[in-house]
Amino acid sequence: MKRILLFAISILIFAACNASGKTVIYKITVKNPVNINRRHQTVEVSLTSLGIDIPEVEKFGITDEKGNIIVFQHYDSDYDGKNDAILFQTDIKANESKTFILKPLKKQPEFNSKVYSRFVPERTDDYAWENDKVAFRTFGPDAQRRYEKGDPTGTLTSGIDCWLKRVDYPIINKWYEKATTGKGSYHKDTGEGFDDYHVGASRGCGGTGVWSGDTLWVSKNFTSWKRLANGPVRTEFVLDYAEWNANGKPVKEQKIISLDAGGNLSKIKVKVKGVDTLTAGITLHENTGKIVAEPDEGWFTYVETHREKDYIIGTAIVLNPENIAGYRTYISPVPDHSHLFVDMKVNSGEVVYYSGFYWSKSGQFKDEKEWEEYLHNFSVEIQNPLVVKIEKIK
């Protein structure tokens, strides 16, 4: 199974700058504080907090104790257009500690990226993102305009679509090219997977809204986008939405979405004004699947079987349980309105949660039980970040 952590605690034992011009080398010790094995854990290290100047950040890299370079990514943690941190991943056993080296490299290596995202103007105006496990998309203003004009090629939703992939290489560009050139369709599985997940007017896999007056009030399509990072460890982007009405209250919403290599869940940070509770939803489609809710642990999943196509898909929402304000199953005769809803507390204008899925034909999980174990462990991981200690050794 693939598990991913998007946080780290940094304890800076010795922070020093390289103003003297001498080469500086740091030892990074990563400790897993819990009794579970963790895979594909992302570690984020702020280089500027070590006294490393912004121009010098991109000279640094990560190696193991033997000096072997491992995959890393220079990263702009505050989104000001300048890289100030470095990301890398590791597998780490229960209660294990591992050591890595942060140092300047003579030559920056090139890595094959397992993550990717981009705006897709050739298919109206989707924004799509993927890693080696899963793929998603959501919809922009041109798709909304077409819908409102009655054009059948339009789409009106701020829900999240799942693309069911069964390969570990990027498929977004390939699938869109097939569709836009007429050489194929991403709705047909030719061995890589396909788009068989229905969003419609629903929240899809983790879209948001405001629950008020026994109704979920939602935004329309995103109005603008900006890509913040694009691999090889993490892809990240921001989506803005026009102000919308929630039962008489004006709401303003911005989403920062990231996806790291090796995991099945996107991290979604919502900056929201106008409400103190935000609701994330998972569509129940025909309401023929099984809901498992573990609010004390912070995870929720809906697993449905598509018998005519002989596959299972499980969608999920995960967040820190202290931020859960409630949850409910809402069943409606109106198409695309039945959901599993999770109410989330807004803290200082922000909400952070994770959403994603597994597809049985990808072979990533043996069965539903293994999927639920993944969600349980993921919830443990976000509540128990890796402990990262950094010390200067030269």
Image (tube, grey):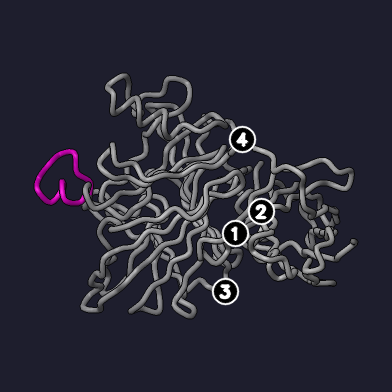
- Determine which residue is flagged by label 1: 83
Judge left or right: residue 335 versus residue 354: left
Residue 319: mark: none
Say whether disc 1 or disc 3 marks the residue closer to the N-terminus: 1
Residue 322: mark: 3
Say whether disc 2 or disc 3 marks the residue closer to the N-terminus: 2
Q: Secondary structure at mark 4?
A: loop
Say whether disc 4 or disc 1 marks the residue closer to the N-terminus: 1
Q: Amino acid at mark 2?
A: Glu
Judge left or right: residue 172 versus residue 335: right
> Label 3: how many residues lie within 10 Å, few (<14), some (14-19) or many (20+)?
few
In the rendered structure, are the residues bearing label 2 and label 1 in contact, judged by CB atoms less than 8 Å apart?
Answer: yes
Q: What's the distance in space between the residues labelled 2 and 1, CA to CA?
A: 7 Å
- Determine which residue is flagged by label 2: 58
- Determine which residue is flagged by label 4: 112
> Label 2: how many residues lie within 10 Å, few (<14), some (14-19) or many (20+)?
many
Residue plotted at (62% across, 58% down): 6
Mark 4 or 2: the one toward you: 2
User: Is residue 121 located in the magenta-colored stretch of the structure?
Assistant: no
Q: Amino acid at mark 4?
A: Asn
Q: Can residue 292 be seen in the rendering of this structure?
A: no
Say whether disc 2 or disc 1 marks the residue closer to the N-terminus: 2
Q: What's the distance in space between the residues labelled 4 and 2, CA to CA?
A: 18 Å
